Amino acid sequence: MTSIALPARITMGEARAALADISPRLAAADAPVLDASALVELDSAALALLLDCRRQVLARGATLQISGASPKLRQLAALYGVGELLGL
């Protein structure tokens, strides 16, 4: 299990750079866990990032876990109907 910390902010402005930073670490991890405990400022781009991370990990036959999800992240995921898909 390899923990990968998410940044404190993932909005439309930061999502591309955050994904570029996270993707190589996801690829190197056997059982990646995204630590969302620092993520406090987010919008739907954060969900898009998490879904892309999930897609990358599933494509190589692994599973992705997300830990430390804030109520705000859980509420946004539920609003968009992806909470269960992301394991939130």
Image (cartoon, grey):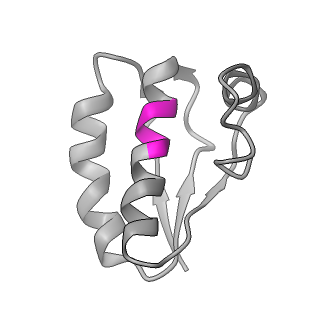
Residue 61 as seen in the image, left or right of residue 75 = left
Tell me which residue sits at (24%, 49%) in the image: 21
Residue 86 as seen in the image, left or right of residue 20 = right
Q: Position of residue 46 (x, y in %)?
A: 47, 30
Q: Is residue 80 above or below residue 30?
A: above
Quadrant of image for the C terminus: top right
Tell me which residue sits at (29%, 43%) in the image: 19
Q: Position of residue 78 (x, y in %)?
A: 75, 27
Quadrant of image for the N terminus: bottom right
Tell me which residue sits at (42%, 27%) in the image: 10
Q: Nearer the viewer, residue 37 or 86?
A: 86
Instruction: Confirm whether the magenta stretch covers residue 67.
Output: no
Q: Position of residue 31 (x, y in %)?
A: 51, 78
Q: Position of residue 33 (x, y in %)?
A: 55, 65
Which secondary structure is most common in the magenta stretch?
helix
- Residues shaded magenta: 47-51
Picture mark count: 0
Q: Is residue 79 above or below residue 63?
A: above
Q: Nearer the viewer, residue 34 or 5?
A: 34
Q: Nearer the viewer, residue 81 or 9?
A: 81
Q: Residue 18 appears in which quarter of the rendering?
A: top left
